[in-house]
Amino acid sequence: MVKLVALYKQPEDKEKFDEHYFNVHVPITKKIPGLKKMKVTKFSTTPMGDVSEYYLMCEMYYEDYDAMKKGMRSEEGKASAKDLMSFAKDIVTLIIGEEKE
Amino acid sequence: MVKLVALYKQPEDKEKFDEHYFNVHVPITKKIPGLKKMKVTKFSTTPMGDVSEYYLMCEMYYEDYDAMKKGMRSEEGKASAKDLMSFAKDIVTLIIGEEKE
């Protein structure tokens, strides 16, 4: 399985971020065709207790690269990308990955 | 479940990194008591096709924060941390997280 990983840096306003992320962005994103599974991780601190650079991570699983590409190019995929840019343009990093073991 | 996430930036020598990572570091890390599951993701590119900042991610799952803390403080946990510092000190970021959905 391949996955699209979204890493979010610490937002300026966490409450506002969470509100939009969980109530708006997640439901929009879940509609993307071909999306098999979605896992959201909230980060706390580093093992040393320091504030981490990242606030949240979302892992979006697809059957293969083709399915991912199709999903991202679909209307629903474009709607999710557009929404993402509206609230997290400056703090989000997207990376495509494949689980090895 | 909580997880310790290790994000590795692009190594200077990918072949050397992989060699040590998969043949030495993973086996050492798998011995840590309390570790429930370990998932390694190899990153390819960003969705735009650019080289991503990160090369690899490892997610290490524990039952709860206490189990994670115990694991990290165990002899095996210390051995894994020591090995990590020997080959990836400058490129690794560690963050503690909890899966939300």
Image (cartoon, coloured by chain):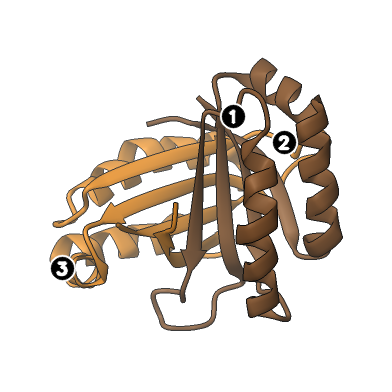
Chain colours: A orange, B brown
Q: Nearer the viewer, residue A42 or A1?
A: A1
Q: Are marks 2 and 3 on the same chain?
A: yes
| Local SS, label 1 | loop
Give the number of the mark in front: 1 or 2.
Answer: 1
- Return the x and y of residue A65 as percentages of the image width and height: 26, 70
| Local SS, label 2 | loop
Asked if one can make out residue A39 in the rendered structure from this viewpoint, the answer is yes
The image quadrant of residue B98 is: top right
User: How far apart are the two marked residues, 1 and 3, measured between alpha carbons?
Assistant: 39 Å
Residue indicated by mark 1: B35
Image mark 1: chain: B
Residue B44 vs A23, above or below: the answer is below
Q: Amino acid at mark 2?
A: Thr
The image quadrant of residue B3 is: top right
The image quadrant of residue A21 is: top left
Image mark 2: chain: A
Asked if the residue at tag 3 contacts the one at tag 1, i.e. Cβ–Cβ closer than 8 Å, the answer is no
Q: Nearer the viewer, residue A45 or B32?
A: B32
Residue indicated by mark 2: A45
Residue indicated by mark 3: A74
Q: Residue at x 30, y 53 (%)?
A: A61
